[in-house]
Image (cartoon, helix red, strand yellow):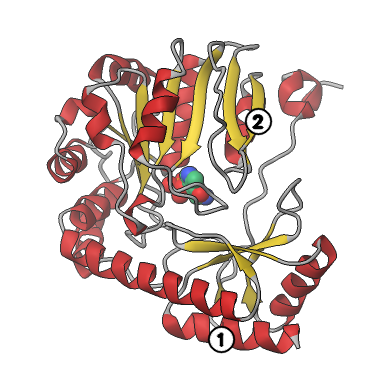
Amino acid sequence: MVGKNVVRACIRDMQAYIPGDAAEDAAVVKLNQNENRYPPSPRAVKAIESALAGVAIYPESTSRTLREAAATVYDVPVDHVIAGNGSDDILRILFHCCCNPGDVAVAFHPTYSYYATLAAMHDVRYRLIDFEGEYRLPDSLNLDDAKLVFLPNPNAPTGTVFPEAEIRRLLQAVPNGLVVVDEAYADFCAVTAMPLLREFDNLVIVRTFSKSYSLAGLRVGLGFARPELLAELEKVRDFYNVDRLAQAGAEAALLDQDWLRYIAGKVAATRDATITALRELGLTVYDSGANFVLVRFPSAARAREIYEGLRSRNVLVRYFDTRGIDDCLRVSIGTDTDMDVFKKELEALLE
Ligand code: PMP
């Protein structure tokens, strides 16, 4: 039987990545995929509408004007920027470009599980090192053999923010590979490793339009690194990886930083109020710099029960059947109204 027998063994053996439930029903309070529940910049919507007239023609292959806007906003030269079909595309490009079968990729547990999926896909050995205490980087880092090391800042699903000194320590601990600082959620706490690009040639920063910019459906991400590395990444990028509508919308969103700050500030304020309210209910909630919070329940059974209970009341949050966090729920921060519904239904379930 041909068919599946021609598939590489590492693909046949791997588990597919499972995204959170995509609910299109307006009645559902959707707090399970860390999307933004506020709309994108009106200028981005307008730019997408205007770009529609051009869809008969291929997009500009390098997303040039989008990258120029990014260079202005993040104060880096334009040759330090690559655009992707979501930041997941940039992550895939990194594996594709840098890893031979058998190479080592490292991340810290618990974290974004797509890194593991990408490692499996590329026949890369994936080493998950446990965080220490309440999600600190280990004191001793032995990463000499690592090709790629991943650290979201803030981390997902814990929300932990790592100070610049910790990012620096990690960069210094990876002499033979790249440190990928995944800043998917960085706008919700204004941290960034961007200034370190001048100092470290093994730093890659990944950013997305899916969270703070409210454009998850558009699929745009950015990567930042030294031009010598980016020139290699460019070779394996699909040459039309960011479509016309996406380039136009993301560029306009970038150029409307007032909107970004307004929305990200609102979400951050709602997050902090949510943390306080949940702690007042007696729950363990970790400090978060992201647009979600990780809430710990007394047992895995209880966390699953609350997850199911919320689901039956039309509130979707995320449950991970994963070591160390199987007694937790990750709750994305929606609008104040969303969070009022969440808190009301949660309180009813806790009674
Ligand atoms: N990195 C992290 C840490 C994430 O949580 C996500 C969202 N699931 C992504 C990257 C991917 O984001 P996107 O592909 O939508 O840009």
For mark 1, give the secondary structure: helix
The picture places residue 98, in percent across and down from the top left corner, at 47, 15
Task: Return the residue at label 2.
Answer: 128
The answer to whether residue 79 of the structure is visible from this angle is yes
Q: Quadrant of residue 146?
A: top right
Q: Are marks 2 and 1 in contact (CB under 8 Å)?
A: no
Task: Return the residue at label 1.
Answer: 341
Q: How many callouts does the rendering have? A: 2
Task: Give the side of residue 313 with respect to residue 188, left or right.
Answer: right
Identify the amino acid type marked 2.
Leu
Identify the amino acid type marked 1.
Val
Q: Is residue 17 above or below residue 338?
A: above
Mark 1 Cα shell of 10 Å, populated few (<14), some (14-19), many (≥20):
some
Mark 2 Cα shell of 10 Å, populated few (<14), some (14-19), many (≥20):
some
269 or 102, which lies in front?
269
The picture places residue 9, in percent across and down from the top left corner, at 76, 20
In the image, which is nearer the foreground, mark 2 or mark 1?
Answer: 2
For mark 2, give the secondary structure: strand
The answer to whether residue 25 of the structure is visible from this angle is no
Quarter of the picture holding the N terminus = top right
Cα–Cα span, label 2 and label 1: 36 Å
Identify which residue is drawn at 74% across, 37% down: 15
Q: Is mark 1 within 8 Å of ligand 1?
A: no
Task: Give the side of residue 258 with respect to residue 237, left or right.
Answer: left
Quarter of the picture holding the C terminus = bottom right
Identify which residue is drawn at 56% across, 24% down: 140
